[in-house]
Image (spheres, helix red, strand yellow):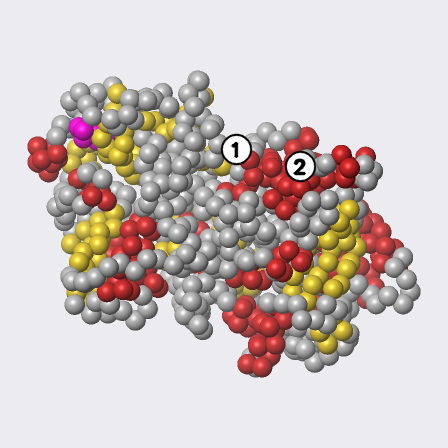
Amino acid sequence: MKRLAVLAALYGCGSTQAAEAGDLVRFVACPVYRDTDSGKKSGCWLGDDRDTGMRWDVSQSPYKPDWNYAMLVEGRPSTDAAKPCGAPTLDPVRTSRLDTPCVQHMIPAEGFTGRKFVLPRRNIAPLSVTRPVPAGPYAERVFPVYFEFDKDFLVYQYDDWLVDNAVTWIRAAKPKRLIVTGFAATEPQVVSGVTLAERPEVAGERAEAIAETLRRLLPGIVMDVRSEPSAQPTDDAEADGLPWQSQRRVEIRALF
Amino acid sequence: MQLLPQRSLPLALGALVLALSVGARGGDTPDRWWAPGEGRVLPAVLDYDNANGTLRTLVVGGPLKTKGHPFFEPLGPNGRACVTCHQPADAMSLSVASAQRQWERTGGKDPLFAAIDGSNCPTLPQQKRESHSLLLERGLFRIERPWPVRSFNGKPVTPDFTIEVVRDPNGCNSGVYGPAAGRISVYRRPRPVANMKYLLAVGFPYDPKQGYALPLDPDDGKPQSGNLMADNRAGNLRLQMEDAGSSHLGMLKRLTPAQRKRLQDFELRVFTAMQVSKAGGAVDSGGAKAGPARLRDSAPGALGSIGEPVWSEFKGWESIPPEEAARLTPEQLAFRQSVARGAKVFRDKTFLITDTAGINSRIGFGNPVRNSCVFCHNMSQMGNDVAPGQVDLGTTTLPFADPWADLPLFKVTCTGRPHPHYGRVIYTYDPGFALTSGKCADVGKITLQSMRGLSARAPYFSNGLAKDLRGVVDYYERRYSIGYTEQEKQDLVNLMSVL
């Protein structure tokens, strides 16, 4: 809770206050699937913040919910007032699947269109497309990769893009070695009445997941794999200004 | 124990019709069955009729003299060659009709029915037809997997699940077989050895279903496609050949480098697809651009959603000009229009995909997610998955799988995290990819099937649950409550019949 209070002070209001554009919102809820049909991947994900009574559109998360399990929602209200899913939108937003079972709940479109799928900015090109060589000069640099709450899984069209950019740079820069450090947000925080803390061992699991991917993409590279069972928020742009997301990371540090 | 399901009569009649069709081609025509060691010449272009039309197989750089060629010669003591289970007339796989025909012609003496895997279990009396019922009724071969799990490169894996045998109708998961003896028997259809450049193609550097970069080929260090085998146990052709040589062929020695080179060279040169539809005519006519030559000449590995849409080969049949329509019979015209509609249904008819590992977990598309057939069948020209295609459709795992009293049933208990959809305890006929990865989350995942030459190689799915193309559509309808209209179902069947 102390950590949450600190974060709230650092990054704006928590979910218990009226959320306006730019405020941070964080809650736990069972996901609601609204079956809109504007083509592929156009269904809507909604979540109700029990503390405020607000229903939010959380569909813009890179990692979508599973209707069988509760989700941790973290985001900011969008500056776009449109409600294609019938609720104000959190964007940026992250949803993480928790282990708490939920009753499946699907509601009809009720006239809402949902969103036609648009390829996200963070998508990688096929291997047949040559990656541009990043410009030098090259010096020590850190590449973060981000995760769901308490998970070590490489998030599609988010982490693969981050890793791809890192690997393209590393191939060009040819550092002497890499230090891969996994972090975990282990300090307990109460969200929607639920105490949440990442397992300390997820820091190591994340580091090893990224290290294995790097071994495959950069065969023979010298690599130290480490873990830190605690994490401070960062202001890295690819965490989209979400402090909790920035904590759940692996850092790939290239050393010369 | 039911060893002779009631479906045997219609299937036998089908085989008879097929045999008559072959006979009608002329007494001097070589038999459609390629037996090991015949020494025939494999032509550069080889056509075989089936119920839906004509399948064409192309051998780039052919013809090929098969005498002494390791694909066509018996390499082990059981008399089998690769061609035994990868027949040109069957799109380089094996149809149940061909298996039945060989049983009738040879009284069950053909090497196809070798005890090691062409029978339900080697411990059964091999002279009896019912001992081979899984092959004769559903085209299934016994596949023996080690327990505890070994990954594709032979590396031991500590599984995060235990496995028990609930039911063993064939005796091949108890006694000297089964998990306790380190030998798990599952039963699967042979996959086509053709159009291989597509199955080996790598589109992107990551496996989004597993959350890692693609594993590297132990031989050349390049990323592996993960699309060769049902359980992804062999990541490259060498490993696949060695696996097949030691198991299906019963080889006592390893393949020599020269044999491997010839096998690989051949497998990369074979392309097969339907060339002529009985109902619609040539599939590369009237504006359509399908057929094996297109497969041979196209670049593999392209994602249909950002390039050439999947099955757009039939776009020319969407709106057939009046002058072209006038040259067709009403039935031909209607069939071509149906195929074109089927291609659009395949691409555009969306439905909710639910509780399917490899799609709804762990990749992050959400559960459910609305999409169409091309969500997974996404590679241009082939319809396999550009990413490694391990997905659990439920075809082998309860409660989604159809009931099969003649298949073994396993109880899998997850010892780590529960399976994202089935929970901690899973009942399955075939754990699939989990027998390679050792992960409970992969139970029931089977690599997507190749979609070419389907008319030549019924039945379908890894355990042969769909006896015909309509059965494929019906399974998906049951599994996902798609709401296909009767017309859409027929359009999909017609589409698949011409691939």
**Foreground: B364 or B498?**
B498
Please provide the residue range marked out in magenta.
Answer: A22-28
Discs 2, 1 touching: Cβ within 8 Å: no
Q: Is residue B59 magenta?
A: no
Q: Which mark is residue A120?
A: none
Q: Which mark is residue B318?
A: 2
- Residue B135 as seen in the image, left or right of residue B16: left
Q: Residues within 10 Å of mark 2 (few under 14, many from 20)?
A: some
Name the residue rendered at 60%, 37% in the picture. B344
**Foreground: B53 or B188?**
B53
Please identify the quarter of the rendering in which residue B75 is found: bottom right
The amino acid type of the residue labelled 2 equals: Glu
Residue B170 in sight from this viewpoint: no
Q: Nearer the viewer, mark 2 or mark 1?
A: 2
Residue that extends furthest to the right in the rendered view of this protein: B27
Name the residue rendered at 88%, 59% in the picture. B25
